[in-house]
Image: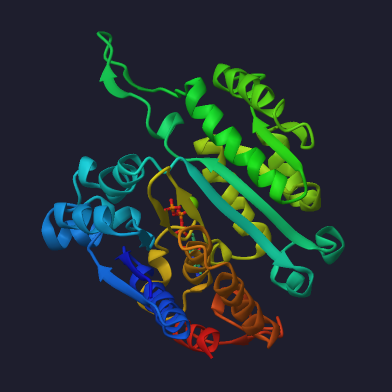
Amino acid sequence: MSNYKIALLDGDGIGPEIMTEAVKVLELVAERNNITFDLIHAPFGASAYFECGHPFPEDTKKVCDEAHAILKGPIGLSHEESQKIPVDMQPERGALLPLRRRYNTYANFRPVFLPQGLAHFSPLKPEIIGDGIDIMIIRELVGGLYFGDKETGTTPEGVRYVRETLEYDENQIRRIAIVAFDTAMKRKKVLHNIHKSNVLKSSVLWNEIMAEVGKDYPEVRVENILVDAAATYLCLNPGRFDVMVMENMFGDILSDQGGGILGSLGLMPSACLGDDKAYYEPSHGSAPDIAGKNIANPYSMIGSVAMMLEMSFGMDQESKNVWHAMQSVFADGYSTADLSKPGSGVNMIDTQAFGDRVVE
Ligand code: ATP
Ligand code: MG
């Protein structure tokens, strides 16, 4: 009988609400498989700052260190609320980036998935969606602008300036390239390498290393595409993409666009893998505008559980069951407010009811 420890970082905004639904699913999976999940809640994000004075408290680090996997809710505050916290204690700078750095979770998998039967969720026309949308965005998560040196200052002439550095070395690029090619081998053997080499030197090295690694994967067809062009094609012809690999910042932006073409950021789960530890989180933020109303879509959080079951615990069949259960809720004609606008023909249910139906 297996016994896995899972750290649960509820986070901010809609985090606790969608975490509650994910926990229902974890408890069911444990029961069905006669295993134990030790679920340990720990404070993280702005709520942790207000509760214990730090967005990533030492006790939370300990819980995470000891866990087999981490399930993390979204963090962050509205622009106005965030003014109340010192810059270095901001949830992104003080908790999220340190979490990624601590466990070196360099490989971020962000599935952008919508079966043809749910094309009505998307703002794109059915003829553009065709057979459905099925893309795996692979985002490098511990390098680039997010982690480069930063400096703010004023010149002797009194002009304020800021400098941020975008840095990658070949080892960082090679390890994410290998993840991307391995993923392409398991899927359609097509890899879109997203870059901006006509402007950025970092993309020149990126492309060189991608080409080098590609020699070990002769079966994978690689297409190099500029990030701006990729943004257009995601709207005009998402079917041309299968696996897409890109640096940190490009991945942040294109994956939110991925949520956009599906119809809601609530459909965006993710997995963040390092060599020794993985954590799982919705791709979206804490959505302060809808927090506490029991209307957020928990798909992103429950989908992150499905990714954990497969990628951390090797429970492939239970992972498939969770995906299937969520798709069934949609197929039965139900969804949360983000995807059930008046006139859409979709019956609106709340966050809790969505979780209950998945469990059912
Ligand atoms: P971050 O910078 O942390 O990624 P963001 O500025 O991209 O945050 P989000 O908080 O991700 O913003 O969300 C943008 C909007 O998308 C929210 O205000 C909310 O209306 C919607 N949204 C996000 N997640 C969900 C969800 N799970 N269910 C329903 N709507 C959501
Ligand atoms: Mg965002």
> In the displayed structure, would residue 208 be above or below residue 106?
above
In the displayed structure, does residue 206 sit left or right of residue 345? left
Q: Position of residue 336 (x, y in %)?
A: 55, 80
Q: Quadrant of residue 13?
A: bottom left
Q: Position of residue 291 (x, y in %)?
A: 38, 72
In the displayed structure, does residue 140 sit left or right of residue 42? right
Q: Position of residue 61 (x, y in %)?
A: 21, 52
> In the displayed structure, would residue 277 be above or below residue 126?
above
- Which quadrant, please, contains the C terminus? bottom right
Q: Position of residue 344 (x, y in %)?
A: 70, 81
Looking at the image, what colour scheme do you see?
rainbow
Q: Quadrant of residue 259?
A: bottom right
Let me know if residue 128 appears in the view.
yes
Let me know if residue 9 appears in the view.
no
| Residue at image location 25% in from the left, 57% down from the top | 66
| Residue at image location 47% in from the left, 61% down from the top | 282
Q: Residue furthest top?
A: 156
Q: Residue furthest right?
A: 127
Q: Residue furthest front?
A: 1
Q: Nearer the viewer, residue 342 or 165?
A: 165
Q: Quadrant of residue 30?
A: bottom left
In the displayed structure, does residue 178 sit left or right of residue 132? left
> In the displayed structure, would residue 247 be above or below residue 130?
above
Q: Nearer the viewer, residue 169 or 231?
A: 169
Q: Residue furthest left?
A: 52
Q: Nearer the viewer, residue 284 or 168?
A: 168
- Which quadrant, please, contains the N terminus? bottom left
Count of numbered tags: 0
